[in-house]
Image (cartoon, coloured by chain):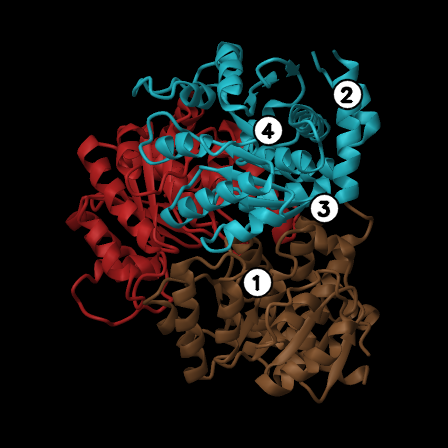
Chain colours: A cyan, B red, C brown
Amino acid sequence: MTTEPLEATRAALARVRGAEPLVQCLTNTVVTNFTANALLALGASPAMVDVPGEADAFARVAGGVLVNLGTPHAEQRAAMTEAATAAREAGTPWVLDPVAIGALPVRTPLAHALLALGPAVVRGNASEILALARAGAGGRGVDAAEKVEQAAEAARGLARTSGAVVAVSGPVDLVTDGARTVRIANGDALLTKVTGGGCALGAVMAAFAAVTEDVFDATVAAVTTYTVAAELAAEGRPGPGTFAVRFVDALAAVGDTDLVARAALS
Amino acid sequence: MTTEPLEATRAALARVRGAEPLVQCLTNTVVTNFTANALLALGASPAMVDVPGEADAFARVAGGVLVNLGTPHAEQRAAMTEAATAAREAGTPWVLDPVAIGALPVRTPLAHALLALGPAVVRGNASEILALARAGAGGRGVDAAEKVEQAAEAARGLARTSGAVVAVSGPVDLVTDGARTVRIANGDALLTKVTGGGCALGAVMAAFAAVTEDVFDATVAAVTTYTVAAELAAEGRPGPGTFAVRFVDALAAVGDTDLVARAALS
Amino acid sequence: MTTEPLEATRAALARVRGAEPLVQCLTNTVVTNFTANALLALGASPAMVDVPGEADAFARVAGGVLVNLGTPHAEQRAAMTEAATAAREAGTPWVLDPVAIGALPVRTPLAHALLALGPAVVRGNASEILALARAGAGGRGVDAAEKVEQAAEAARGLARTSGAVVAVSGPVDLVTDGARTVRIANGDALLTKVTGGGCALGAVMAAFAAVTEDVFDATVAAVTTYTVAAELAAEGRPGPGTFAVRFVDALAAVGDTDLVARAALS
């Protein structure tokens, strides 16, 4: 199990750098800049086209699309539905990141409606994945302290019912398509001290999905590349400001040697 | 006067790091990222929930709320009123930052309307505080060159009439609740060369107020911690890009020793 | 041809630092922070006033205005038309950056409508300038691979018909007012790996135009200063995260000696 995903990751990273896939991001106002710079560093080409009337057309030509619900203003909500619908029709893989859903009354039903439009990947922390999997179970709210392994079964169920690959972020990340499950024990806690650390990963998943046939492989490759880069950036235990800068450098520099030496897939 | 606020500052910083207060930010599009990273570095937990329909619910569970008028688009204006109203009802301390009010016709009446909703803290430069204190005095406009000490009396008056602690930023910061006044002679001019240098301080005030009984003590502690961190980051006179990175590092690293060695409270 | 623009550039940079011109930016959500920090580093004073009802008043007192179409949400579109109209009436020079126009159906007609309001400068890559020059030629779309020299004739024509100075960005930048044309062979490819590398240049052009009688001279000076700073920041081939930080430092540090040693104007 450990060799195959590693080989697939190395190949996928090479394809991202070779193809420079166009990634359309409809994401929150806090992380647009960091997300675009992360994609550029990795070799992808970001485009934040999130205006109704344009989101549709762009999703048909983009290689991948990210829909992140962090600050879902009305106009962006309309553009999200447009982009997701167009992506589905055009066969463009798109990633749904249901940021902070559970109790919040605008984004929670929006996340469920978007899920019905068939994302290729759903990415979240344990609480968000549990909230999305609990569709229709009522307003139980979400305990932010819930852990990745507590969400593993819900993630597999969500993958099976939705058809999406589901990625749960945490100290050890979990990726599942309902049948296959891989855990990635890479990364660094410093990534949780940089806003957008998780959000930018959703965009990176869209970049990998744009150039990879198997969405499960693409998602594992995205998580592995991203979290190994975080380990490189964390060397010497910099402060969080310096870490964020070095992380962008690391996304540009991370290569085969780092993946082989560090990838902890199981 | 110098020992007590210093002790209160040290204790408040320890509480922020221990409690990781949840700080809801409704702030301008220019500084969202820097603000969130400053809060994370300090040990607080940022959440930029500024969508109508969600701002109310979140303000009731947040530890503190920031309302910053830098780019007050219509939807955010509605969310600001929602959040401020809910914060008042729930007893959540909230900070009003009336960015660039005076002559600008959308944000100026909005600032006065929000002031009536009872912020725990009002933060601004001398011109903004004077503009807010001049309510009803007509469109005299604001001289951006006005200095902190020229606004001292207006700040005390504003504190007394509004019930808010008022903080005036400048080379020497002033904090007053109408009865007590403390001046903090820390900081560095490099902070004025980083966009959001003042805006993020408003969010930090909300973090300190979330974990401190006395809002005056909380505000003094926030200004002192923030401006001492700026001094640490300014060592060696870096360029403004490097300074911004080091400042985030310094917010994570600043501790008792720095506060004792540097705090210039009077 | 090489001495005069260099002298004009040195003089214009000194004026920017001396006058600290107020630059109003109506720009996309991805680059607001980087743009403001670039202006501050250079010595200008940024203000992101992009709310309808305020954009008009501010454009009358600002030294220069930037209108950038990167994420043209409805409310910002209204503010853009307001600001451009007011700038024209008040004689405030304003810069139009028609980001990604061509096929996208909201921003493309908006760019043409704004062009009719008389920008002092139009800035774009070759594809965007060709798309703007092709007004009325129908939906041919734009080949993103088009090169600066392929757009030179269109740029001259656009300058003549619109009255604007036209700047085409690329490995060698071109600036023309229809009669005069200067090429600037400075800069570094790392600038294309930082989001907003082009967008912030539009704001810098507005800063230079605010303090320079001849808009053509101002635009050449802006491009030269900006791309020479990029060369300084690129020394040692840093990663893209580090480059972005050093570039802000370099905008603050770039001076006469650098301009004389490096400016490659022809």
Query: Residue A263: percent from the left, percent from the top?
Result: 74, 19
Q: Are marks 3 and 1 on the same chain?
A: yes
Query: Residue C213: percent from the left, percent from the top?
Result: 59, 86
Q: Is residue C211 above or below residue C39?
A: below
Q: Which residue is mark 3?
A: C240
Residue at 40% in and 78% down:
C86
Q: Are marks 4 and 3 on the same chain?
A: no
Q: Nearer the viewer, mark 3 or mark 1?
A: 3
Q: Earlier in the sequence, mark 4 or mark 2?
A: 2
Compare residues A208 and C174 and report the one nearer the observer. A208
Q: Amino acid at mark 4?
A: Leu
Residue at 35% in and 69% down:
B143
- Label 3 crowding class (10 Å Cα cut-off): few <14, some 14-19, many 20+? many
- Label 4 close to label 1 by CB (< 8 Å): no
Query: Residue B232: percent from the left, percent from the top?
Result: 57, 40
Dot 1: chain letter: C
Q: Amino acid at mark 2?
A: Leu
- Label 4 close to label 2 by CB (< 8 Å): no
Dot 3: chain letter: C
